[in-house]
């Protein structure tokens, strides 16, 4: 371990926490949809509401967590989040009513808020500047790599049942997540390091702390338009992303694709996104992040157009390439842009606010897609509407002014 900057060990720990949470709680949860509907006879819309409550982590909780992580640090919140996720999965496994299902998902959102995007990205962003795109790219790859767990979850459900599968996932969360969360540290200056590596003398440490304290306050940042433009663009992206993730297997089943094949497609989305997560992160350290982000929105629209014609086998291929690359690249570039525009002192707060606003889309998307299928018997129209929405995201993100040395947005 000697000679390796500790920030990279933080990146590794964050990667594996994100791997498990992304695979078991985000991408893989689509496999629980049908068994729950079949057992209780609830509508797709009713169950979609429950699953969409995971978006509370990005909504009400994300801004709060953003302020908490800047105040108390990432380590404590990560440990709390891992433990809470385990309990929430056990509660969901004992579901007997819609109220209990919704309560379980609300608790899950609380736990996810403690050990996912805001906390992990803030922890990593505190340790890097020059290599921020690469570091966040690797961390973001954890969420995408979790896609390898997607085929495992239907297997657990078929081998045991959906309730037992949830308990197994809860125990796994505790066994792997708690030791990894203990690796998380807060700002490197507290341990005598500089961001990106190197040991700092005492005088430099004092100067660096004063510099961080002198960064623009969040109130000043919030008065600029940058925060709100990024929030609007991301809200639209999350309408599309969450709808696809929740409904992809159901959609493919509805057009005649076998369940096993649909599971492979669902697994391929986060796995292919790995290329976008690291690739766009690497490019973000070189090129203007605004234009790269606009490219990801364009690819999203192209992916949704391809998905609407998924009955043609070649369309699935184009959907996976366009949509997955955009998904991965957008996640990484969002964090890199915030670090560039707002600095470390307000990074967690800014990310929390943006994720909070994005959550409006994250909740609406799956419900809207479920309602469309319940009323029309097809998803095609909603996919085409989502394709059109990406034009707004592209336009909004290109309205941003270039980042300056100031921590203020434009």
Image (cartoon, rainbow, N blue to C red):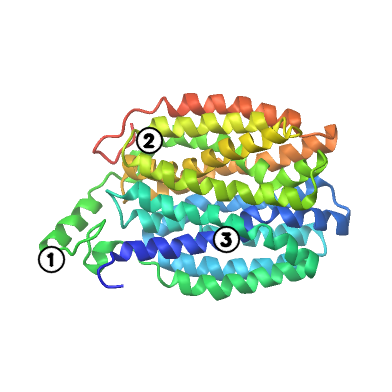
Circle 2/circle 1 CB separation < 8 Å: no
Residue at x 28%, y 50% (from the top left corner): 129
Q: Quadrant of the C terminus?
A: top left
Q: Position of residue 329 (x, y in %)?
A: 47, 41
Residue under numbered circle 2: 289
Q: Position of residue 321 (x, y in %)?
A: 57, 38
Dot 1 and dot 3 residues touching (CB under 8 Å): no
Give the CA separation, mark 1 to mark 3: 39 Å
Q: Is residue 281 above or below residue 28?
A: above
Asked if residue 310 lies left or right of residue 188, the reply is: right
- The image quarter in which residue 317 lies: top right
Q: Residue furthest front?
A: 314
Farthest left residue in view = 203
Q: CA distance from mark 2 to mark 1?
A: 35 Å
* Image spot of residue 233 (x, y percent): 51, 33
- Disc 3 crowd rating (10 Å Cα; few below 14, some 14-19, many 20+) is many
Local packing at callout 1 (Cα closer than 10 Å; few below 14, some 14-19, many 20+) is few
Secondary structure under badge 2? helix
Q: Which residue is mark 3?
A: 21
User: In the displayed structure, would residue 250 be above or below residue 102?
Assistant: above
Cα–Cα span, label 3 and label 2: 27 Å
Q: Secondary structure at mark 3?
A: helix
**Mark closest to the chain's N terminus, 2 or 1:** 1
- Mark whose residue sits in front, 1 or 3: 3
User: In the rendered image, which residue does mark 1 sit on?
Assistant: 202
Foreground: disc 2 or disc 1: 2
Can residue 225 be spotted in the picture? no
């Amino acid at each position: 371990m000697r000679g390796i900057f500790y920030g990279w060990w933080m990146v590794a720990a964050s990667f594996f926490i994100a791997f498990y949470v992304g695979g078991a709680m985000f991408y893989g949860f689509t496999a629980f949809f049908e068994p729950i509907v079949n057992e209780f006879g609830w509508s797709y819309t009713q169950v979609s509401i429950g699953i969409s409550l995971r978006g509370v982590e990005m909504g009400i909780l994300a801004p709060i967590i953003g302020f908490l992580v800047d105040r108390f640090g990432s380590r404590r919140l990560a440990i709390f989040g891992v433990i809470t996720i385990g309990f929430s999965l056990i509660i969901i496994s004992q579901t007997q009513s819609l109220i209990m299902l919704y309560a379980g998902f609300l608790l899950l959102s609380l736990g996810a808020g403690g050990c996912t995007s805001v906390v992990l990205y803030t922890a990593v962003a505190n340790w890097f500047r020059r290599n921020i795109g690469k570091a966040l790219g690797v961390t973001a790859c954890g969420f995408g790599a979790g896609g390898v767990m997607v085929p495992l979850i239907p297997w657990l459900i078929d081998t045991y049942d959906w309730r037992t599968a949830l308990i197994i996932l809860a125990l796994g969360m505790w066994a792997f997540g708690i030791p990894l969360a203990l690796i998380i540290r807060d700002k490197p200056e507290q341990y005598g390091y500089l961001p990106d590596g190197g040991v700092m003398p005492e005088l430099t440490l004092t100067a660096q702390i004063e510099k961080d304290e002198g960064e623009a306050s969040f109130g000043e940042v919030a008065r600029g338009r940058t925060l709100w433009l990024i929030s609007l663009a991301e809200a639209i992206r999350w309408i599309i992303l969450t709808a696809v993730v929740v409904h992809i297997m159901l959609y493919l089943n509805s057009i005649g694709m076998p369940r096993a094949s649909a599971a492979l497609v669902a697994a391929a989305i986060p796995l292919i996104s790995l290329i976008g997560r690291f690739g766009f992160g690497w490019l973000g350290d070189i090129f203007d992040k605004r234009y790269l982000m606009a490219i990801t929105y364009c690819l999203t629209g192209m992916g949704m157009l391809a998905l609407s014609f998924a009955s043609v086998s070649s369309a699935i291929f184009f959907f996976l390439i366009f949509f997955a690359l955009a998904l991965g690249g957008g996640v990484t570039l969002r964090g890199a842009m915030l670090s560039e525009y707002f600095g470390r002192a307000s990074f967690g707060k800014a990310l929390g606010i943006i994720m909070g606003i994005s959550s409006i889309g994250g909740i609406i998307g799956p419900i809207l897609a479920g309602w469309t299928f319940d009323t029309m018997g097809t998803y095609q129209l909603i996919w085409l509407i989502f394709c059109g929405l990406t034009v707004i995201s592209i336009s909004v993100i290109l309205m941003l002014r270039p980042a300056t040395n100031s921590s203020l947005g434009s």
